[in-house]
Amino acid sequence: MPVILGHESAGIVELVGEQVRYVQPGDHVITCLSVFCGHCDYCVTGRPYICKSSETAREENEPSRITQSGKNINQYYNLSAFAEQMLIHEHALVKIREDMPLDRAALIGCAVVTGFGAVIHTAQIEVGSTVAIIGCGGIGLAAINGAAIAGAGRIIAVDIKESKLELARQLGATDVINASEGDPVVQIKALTAGGVEYSFEALGLKATAEQAFRMLRPSGVATIIGMVPEGQMIEVDAVDLLDDRKLQGSNMGSNAFRVDMPRFVDFYLNGDLHLDQMIAKRIPIEQINDAFEEMKRGEFARSVIVFDH
């Protein structure tokens, strides 16, 4: 059931296959890596983000749907982006309001649903709770903004760049800690008289994942959003487990994106979700390698690729 989609990870449907029922040409949509089948054990028990079914993907022995000059073109996670058009399964997208700017909507498909979702779905923070977010890139900032919308009482942002910490304040952080000026665990425990109830790691590093666990108060929950390199082990002091502290992972914010993303669009249009501040630059596809280098240096939250015609 393929859908041809214009623009990057948010766009307008141009053409649909004969079995597609959910969308039609002209619909405004956001795509998502959490492609779901809708009837496996994970999907029917409320975990479509972890769907393991292969039926939404092309079989290995089937011919590729996309070729160029006689060569097959593969799609990362059967989705991919960085292109003017995408050919995807209808379960990889969600319809949104037509008054939502598509360059802002593109952020929702990955960074926002991952960071915001980790706060409200994976960790399920309570109103008034104390929260710490390590890493103020796109996902960390989305977690900060999501925690503010969810009613966290105190939101502590941790990073090593003052420019990102200032941006974190704009998106809802009540306190900021520069980790280059001292151990963030020590600073947070001093600031909170013992630790936070919820911590989120949004960098994907072994050291910061372990810090997220160590900065918890008893019965606290550390959620690892970042992708720690495969093969690396995260170590915790076993004694801390006796105080009911928990360490957990999160896959794409434990999302139900067909429900979540339209709500995030509403939050943006109502002035609560601050996507404008997250976009540092709008660039053409020709500058993508420069954008990757800037990302590695941690200079910006997000750059958005815009295709002009």
Image (cartoon, helix red, strand yellow):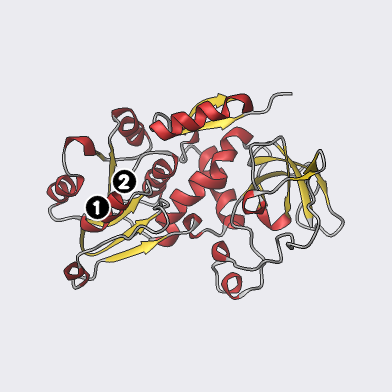
Count of marks, rendered view: 2
Write down the residue under mark 1: 211
Amino acid at circle 2: Ile
Q: Is residue 236 left or right of residue 224?
A: left
Q: Quadrant of residue 70?
A: top right
State whether residue 178 appears in this view. no
Amino acid at circle 1: Gln
In the image shown, does 227 or 35 lie closer to the viewer?
A: 227
> From the image, which quarter does the C terminus lie in?
top right
Name the residue rendered at 62%, 25% in the picture. Answer: 286
Question: Helix or strand or loop: what does disc 2 sit on?
Answer: strand
Disc 1 to disc 2, how far (Cα)?
9 Å
In the image shown, does 51 or 173 lie closer to the viewer?
A: 51
Residue 102, how many percent across, how many down? 63, 35
Write down the residue under mark 2: 134
| Image position of 208 with respect to 137: above or below | below
Residue 228, how many percent across, how many down? 39, 53
